[in-house]
Image (cartoon, rainbow, N blue to C red):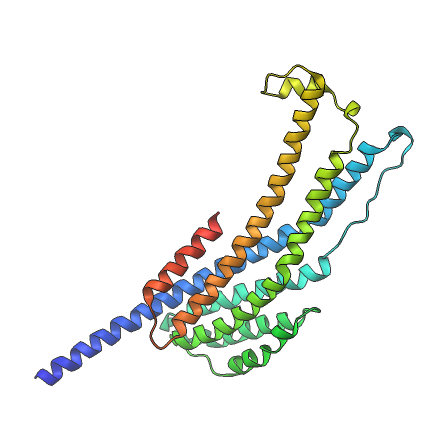
C-alpha cells in the first residue's frame, strides 16, 4: 500500500511538473511572437527613415538657399538601406510564424501541426541564409540549427522545442548585435544632420511675431523669441532621435531575454521563477 502511495505521489509531482513546463513553454512562445512582431515594427520604422531624411534635407536646402526664388526643387540623395532591411523583415515574419506554430504544440490536440512547425522553422532558417552580409560568427552556427530542424518535432516536447528555439534566437541575437551600431549611427546621422542644418538657417527667415503668438514663454525681444523657437525645434528633433534609439535598444534587450528564457526552459532542471522574471522583463521592455 505504501509503495502505491509513493508511486501516486511521484505521478502527481511529475504531472504537476509537466503541466508547469507546458505553461512555461506556451508563455515563451507567446513572448516570441510579441518580440518577433516588435522586430517587424522596428524594421518598418527604419524603412521609413530614408524618406524622412530626404524630406528633411530638401527642407534645409530650401531654407539655407540665398535665392530661393531662383532655385529648382531640391532632390537630395540619401542613404538607402532597403536591400538590407527587406530580408530582415522577411526573417522576422518567418520567426513570427515559427512561434505561432510552436505555441500550438504545447497542446496535444494540435499534434497534427508538427509538420507546420517544422516547415516554419525551415522557412526561418532559410530566410537568414538570404542575408548578403552574414558574419562568420553567425554562419558557423547555421549547420547546428539545420541539424536540429532535420530531427522530428513532437507535440508537448517542451524542452526539445526550446533547445531549437534557443539556437535559433541565438543567431537572431548575434545578427542584431552586429546590426545595432549601424542602425544607431544611421539614426544619429539623419537627426543630427537635420538639427545642425536648421541651426544654419538665417534668423531673418523666421517670423518672430508669428512665433511669439504660439509661445508660452513671456519673451518680447525678437532675437530671443527666435532663439527659443530654434531651441524648441532642436530639442524635438533630438527627442525623436533618442526615442527611436531607445526602441532599438529595448528590442535588443527583449530578444536577449527571450533567448535566455529558451535556454533556461531547455535545461534538465528549469527554474520557473527565473523564466517568469524573464517573461515579465520582456513584457516591460516591449510596452515602453
Q: As drawn, which residue projects farthest toward the left?
A: 1
Residue at image position (74%, 20%) is 207
Q: Is residue 96 left or right of residue 222?
A: left
Residue sitting nearer the eye, 159 or 102: 159
**In the rendered view, would you say 280 is above or below 175?**
above
**In the rendered view, would you say 91 is above or below 268?**
above
Residue sitting nearer the eye, 95 or 54: 54
Where is residue 274? Give x, y as percent.
36, 64
**In the rendered view, would you say 226 is above or below 254?**
above
- Labels in figure, total: 0
Q: Is residue 119 left or right of residue 11?
A: right
**In the rendered view, would you say 223 is above or below 126?**
above
Residue at image position (79%, 40%) is 58
Residue at image position (62%, 21%) is 215
Where is residue 92? Give x, y as percent.
58, 63
Where is residue 261? Give x, y as percent.
42, 66
Residue at image position (40%, 59%) is 279
Viewer can see residue 105: no
Residue sitting nearer the eye, 150 or 278: 278
Viewer can see residue 128: yes
Q: Which quarter of the figure has residue 20? A: bottom left
Q: As drawn, which residue projects farthest toward the top?
A: 220
Q: Which quarter of the figure has residue 88? A: bottom right
Where is residue 63? Give x, y as percent.
80, 32
Q: Quadrant of the N terminus?
A: bottom left
Amino acid at each position: 500500500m505504501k509503495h502505491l502511495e509513493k508511486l501516486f505521489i511521484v505521478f502527481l509531482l511529475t504531472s504537476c511538473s509537466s503541466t508547469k513546463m507546458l505553461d512555461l513553454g506556451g508563455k515563451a512562445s507567446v513572448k516570441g511572437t510579441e518580440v518577433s512582431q516588435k522586430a517587424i515594427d522596428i524594421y518598418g520604422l527604419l524603412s521609413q527613415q530614408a524618406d524622412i531624411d530626404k524630406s528633411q534635407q530638401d527642407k534645409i536646402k530650401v531654407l539655407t538657399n540665398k535665392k530661393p526664388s531662383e532655385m529648382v526643387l531640391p532632390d537630395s540623395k540619401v542613404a538607402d538601406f532597403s536591400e538590407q532591411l527587406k530580408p530582415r523583415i522577411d526573417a522576422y515574419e518567418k520567426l513570427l510564424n515559427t512561434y505561432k506554430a510552436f505555441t500550438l504544440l504545447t497542446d496535444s490536440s494540435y499534434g497534427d501541426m508538427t509538420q507546420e512547425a517544422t516547415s516554419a522553422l525551415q522557412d526561418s532558417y532559410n530566410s537568414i541564409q538570404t542575408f548578403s552580409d552574414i558574419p562568420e560568427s553567425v554562419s558557423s552556427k547555421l549547420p547546428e540549427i539545420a541539424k536540429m530542424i532535420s530531427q522530428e518535432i513532437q507535440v508537448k516536447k517542451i524542452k526539445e522545442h526550446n533547445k531549437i528555439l534557443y539556437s535559433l534566437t541565438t543567431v537572431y541575437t548575434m545578427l542584431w548585435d552586429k546590426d545595432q551600431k549601424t542602425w544607431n549611427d544611421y539614426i544619429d546621422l539623419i537627426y543630427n544632420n537635420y538639427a545642425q542644418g536648421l541651426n544654419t538657417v538665417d534668423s531673418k527667415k523666421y517670423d518672430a511675431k508669428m512665433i511669439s503668438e504660439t509661445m508660452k514663454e513671456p519673451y518680447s525681444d525678437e532675437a530671443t523669441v527666435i532663439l527659443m523657437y530654434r531651441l524648441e525645434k532642436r530639442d524635438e528633433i533630438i527627442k525623436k532621435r533618442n526615442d527611436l534609439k531607445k526602441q532599438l535598444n529595448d528590442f535588443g534587450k527583449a530578444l536577449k531575454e527571450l533567448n535566455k528564457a529558451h535556454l533556461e526552459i531547455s535545461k534538465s532542471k528549469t527554474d520557473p521563477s527565473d523564466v517568469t522574471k524573464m517573461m515579465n522583463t520582456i513584457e516591460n521592455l516591449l510596452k515602453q
